[in-house]
Amino acid sequence: MLVKWRISVPWLPLRTVAVLTLSALVVALCGCGSSTASSEVSGKVTLKGDPVAGELVFVGNDKKEYLTPLNPDGKYSLLSVPKGEYAVVVRASSLPAAPTIKAPPPTGGGSLPEPPKAGVTPPAKYAKPGNGLTFTVTGGKQSKDFELAE
């Protein structure tokens, strides 16, 4: 004798149960959002008006670092920075210098454009937190220029 078992809740269709179960699983796996809103901070670092070469680091109260390289023109863009107070560090790049490659002369009598001029080295006093540079990330897109002194 063959017995068929069927479990059902007459007031709740099977399709609704499946949708609710799937929804609960998605929420459990993905979460309801980030607990810290991220931001984008961009700007320029200069010394006596000249762009600075190296890297910019935001150091949080928890000592977590958010690092970005400085472009040849001193500009930077730091993404996904949680809201909060940060000490700002500007230091020479911790990466080795890229090798210099000499391009062959152009054909047709033209000349190559000048490569971007490298920025100036930041003063050593800005290489550690407590140098007087701070910034508060409040959320969204923010712009902050840093003018260093000797």
Image (cartoon, rainbow, N blue to C red):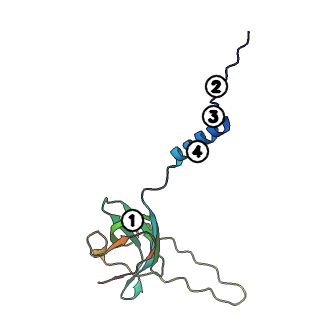
Q: Position of residue 101 (x, y in %)?
A: 56, 74
Instruction: Indicate which disc, 2 or 1, sits on the residue closer to the N terminus.
Output: 2
Q: Position of residue 41 (x, y in %)?
A: 44, 72
Instruction: Indicate which disc, 4 or 1, sits on the residue closer to the N terminus.
Output: 4
Callout 4 secondary element: helix
Q: Quadrant of residue 83?
A: bottom left
Residue at position x 55%, y 82% in the image? 115
For mark 2, does the 10 Å Cα neighbourhood hold few (<14), some (14 to 19), or many (20 or more) residues? Answer: few
Numbered badge on residue 92: none
Q: Which residue is mark 3?
A: 11
For mark 3, does the 10 Å Cα neighbourhood hold few (<14), some (14 to 19), or many (20 or more) residues? Answer: few
Mark-to-mark CA distance, 4 and 2:
21 Å
- The quadrant the N terminus occupies is top right
Task: Give the vertical position of 69 relative to 74 (above or below).
Answer: above
Q: Nearer the viewer, mark 3 or mark 4?
A: 3
Q: Which residue is mark 4?
A: 23
Q: Position of residue 149 (x, y in %)?
A: 30, 84
Instruction: Indicate which disc, 4 or 2, sits on the residue closer to the N terminus.
Output: 2
Q: As shown in the figure, which amino acid type bears the numbered disc 1?
A: Lys
Q: Which residue is mark 1?
A: 83
Mark-to-mark CA distance, 2 and 1:
50 Å
Residue at position x 62%, y 30% in the image? 9
Callout 2 secondary element: loop
Callout 3 secondary element: loop
Instruction: Indicate which disc, 3 or 4, sits on the residue closer to the N terminus.
Output: 3
Residue at position x 64%, y 28% in the image? 8
Q: Which residue is mark 2?
A: 7
Q: Nearer the viewer, mark 4 or mark 2?
A: 2
